Image (cartoon, rainbow, N blue to C red):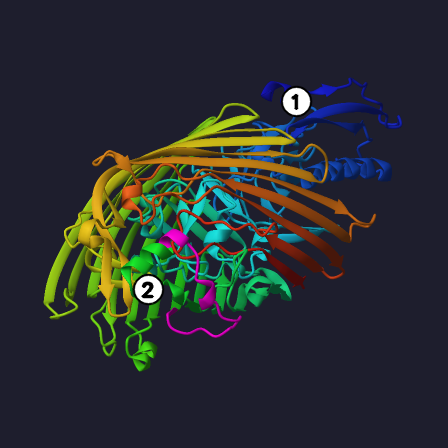
Amino acid sequence: MAKFLNRQTATTTHRPADNEPAKTAPFERPLLINRETITLRYLETNMKLNETNKRCTAPWACYARHVALFFTLALCLTGMPLWAYATENVCLQSPTSDDATIQNVVVVSESSGEPIAGAVVRCNAAFAPVVTDVNGHCQLKLKANTEKARIEVSSVGFKRLVRSFAPSLSQTLTLKMADDAKMIGNVEVTAMKRHTNQMQQTATIGSDALEKGGATSLAKLLEAVPGVSSISTGNTIAKPVIQGMHSSRILLMNNGVRLESQSWGADHAPELDYTGSSMVEVVKGAECIRYGFGAMGGVVLLNDAPLPWGNKRLTTKGNVNLGYDTNARGASGSATVEAGYGRWGARVHGMYTKGGDYSTADYRLNNTGYNTISLSGMLGYEGKHITATIFSSIYYQRSGIYYASKVSDLDQLVKRFEYGRPDPQTIQPFSYEIKPPFQQSQHVTLKGELKWRLNANHQVDFTLSFQENLRQEFENRKKAQWSWIPMQDLILKTYKGDVLWHAKWKLWKMTTDAGLSNTYQTNYNYPGTKQPAFVPNFAALSMGGYFLHKAEWGKLQMALGMRYDFRVMSVNGYTSLSNYTYYDDFKLYSNFTASLAGHYQLNDNWDMRANIGWSWRPPDINELYAIGLQEGSYWVIGNRHLASERGYKSVVGVRYRNTWFNIEPSFFYQRINSYIYDHIGTGKDRFHNHPSGKYPKFIYDQDDVQLTGGDIEATAKPFEGLTLVAKGEWMFARNITRNDWLPFMPSDRYGLSATYTRLLNKSGKWRATLSLSGIYVTKQTRFDPDKDLVSDSPDPYFLLNGTAEVAWRMPQHRELKLMLVGDNVLNNLYKEYTDRFRYYAHERGANFSLRTLFKF
């Protein structure tokens, strides 16, 4: 293929005399764009040269040349990204000349250092412009004896680069392009920087899906990704599950800052606002090397777009997104405004949601309202060698908990489990009021980052961050006046500092990342709760160092990483709810981890990736010492003798794609020794007797386990405007120690969706989109009834979702969108196996969300 692309098919012409008019002869040049071979026809003009050896400027010849270049760029812009499909040595070059000088050029991204494929390189001393290949490389054929030349590089999503250089046969000219967003005709193309690479098994949720989210939780939004489900306690509290792993085994990174509040327990929803993110990435694999201990199941990255710096005059843009949900009668809104001038950029974002009691398909669940407020801001400066940013955010949430989960008699509790829904006589009229039991949390983040570019090949990043998490949980107490006194009143403070050195080497296009990470954390329980703390006071210090090395050999890319971490904790608290027995404890954990990953491009259509990561995780504070009521529905008891989890995870994926079809299956195998999980007790430990009622008891334990499974996603575009997507996922989780199934693992699920987009007028200013998707979740048969509160798992269910959207593109880069989003439009009554509230009630019924988005 490479030989074919480089083959020249110019037609031979005679050289005219000095006084002879110029003649033309066509020559053809094949170019591979989006896996289609496009043959470009050029008019080669033998023009008369003047005495100063300058090319004559015949108007019609310049016109032909510019039309050909414009046609090439138009093909690039209307297709899929070139770097996904380009092959090696794709260059448009003029016919060879014996007097030519060859100049090697490499074009890379200034922010990531990754090669830029499809960049158009022009030079005033070259015979013709050229296009970079998949490695960002091309060759300019310069006129002989050129001492100095002017080069210009342009590529979609990057700022135009112009500079002068002295040609050199022995040295490669490396050009770095800065990210940019440009308006080309009526199409806005924005460069979104991904924080992952092609050796990782990843999936991306773009801005279009985020715009439709509104009040939807992050966990529910991520269920669109194959291999991702959710674990929840009711409808307002949910966490993402990646291939069976959740809570502190899944790292949540918001603008590069790890969310630290997940160690409080699985019943605490992430305090994150995704409405301000430009992209959400899901990494399915053990990623402890890059992100630290705990990333045994994967990582969720919430990424903001780059700040709009680099503008010669003050520019501003933003968006406003407003919506209303029929279920819970909820209102939501978010707004973003950003400005840039010179080397400075700034962004401000805000979000607000409010809803009342939500309904299932048959009945209403009282005291399930929610209220969320989020504010964030970022300020940045970009110089020649330094980029500095400051980010700050605050997030507040109050979530009601369905109160009918409290039953004072054990026989009534068992009957409630068997009935699986509220007593109709207990259902009250709709209300926005949130009463005990409820939980409220506040999350504050402050981050400062400095990127120091020492030279073209070396960069050092310094990052400092601070987090403050406040949490209060309220329960119905025996004394009504005490119900408004929190039973849990916690504050978790985290101080973190990171240093990263990034280097690039010419040999095998190698890159090296080496870093140090330090974290200091304190947890304090405010007095006055009239009850011992659910988790004790503690102070923890974590330190780690790592390196990650990448190299390329033709079509093969490999990465090797190693890391060492240790964590020490000093703990003090009370073990008994009756006699307040005091304890003082000290814990020390440490471990080495490693990873090996590879990606191989078989040909233009096929590629494959594989990675294996050894990982570990120290026990969370709640797993060690928790004792008390959670979510007003179950009792939790920790185990202070738990050891660290250690294991490995291997992920293998294959991908095939062409111009209209794409399919990507992946498979994983994970082995974890000393896996920590909670299960329902047996005998007398099955239920806990409390003054407020009877509750099922969950006890933390530890066994060796293995998880196997996979997922698949296929996308087809049979004709313009129509996109079909089919996906499926399955998993088998075994307890090796007890030769049994692991509890609370997600069921198999399969989905199918169709999206059709059509322009409503010839100018392209009006666009309509219609989308339908269905998901089928199987009955979970891989579980042990003796370790559950009911003898059977929920029935399989099917959900139909849909979206209708109309967009109007207005002058001055403005756009208005009207969106109608429907979830569970058939209003099916169903239960999810991984929802611990399924013993008391069903999942949310039909919901229709009307949203208006205005971009300016």
Residue 747 location in percent, x, y? Answer: 42, 40
Q: Secondary structure at mark 2?
A: loop
Q: Amino acid at mark 2?
A: Val
Residue 680 coordinates in the image, percent (x, y):
26, 50
* Residue drawn where x is 80% and y is 24% of the image: 26
* Separation (CA) of disc 2 from disc 1: 92 Å
Q: Name the element at disc 1.
A: loop
Q: Amino acid at mark 1?
A: Asp
State whether residue 680 is above or below residue 630. above
Residue 833 location, x and y as percent? 41, 46
Location of the N terminus by quadrant is top right
Q: Quadrant of residue 80?
A: top right
For this rendering, which residue is in front, 656 or 847? 847
- Please tell me in which quadrant of the rendered image residue 584 appears: bottom left
Q: Which mark is residue 98?
A: 1
Q: Position of residue 503 (x, y in %)?
A: 38, 44
Query: In this view of the protein, which residue sits in the foreground, 224 or 491?
Result: 224
Overall secondary structure of the magenta section: loop
- Mark sitting on residue 434: none
Up-down relation of residue 546 to residue 99 (above or below)? below
Q: Quadrant of the C terminus?
A: bottom right
Is-magenta flag for residue 5? no
- 193 sits to left or right of 258: right
User: Is 106 positioned to the left or the right of 670 in the image?
Assistant: right
The residue stretch that appears in magenta:
417-440
Closest to the camera, between mark 2 and mark 1, is 2
- The reply to whether residue 180 is in sight is no
Q: Quadrant of residue 540?
A: bottom left
Left or right? Give the position of 12 relative to 634: right
- Reading the image, the residue beneath label 2 is 407
Q: Residue visible at 49% across and 64% down?
A: 380
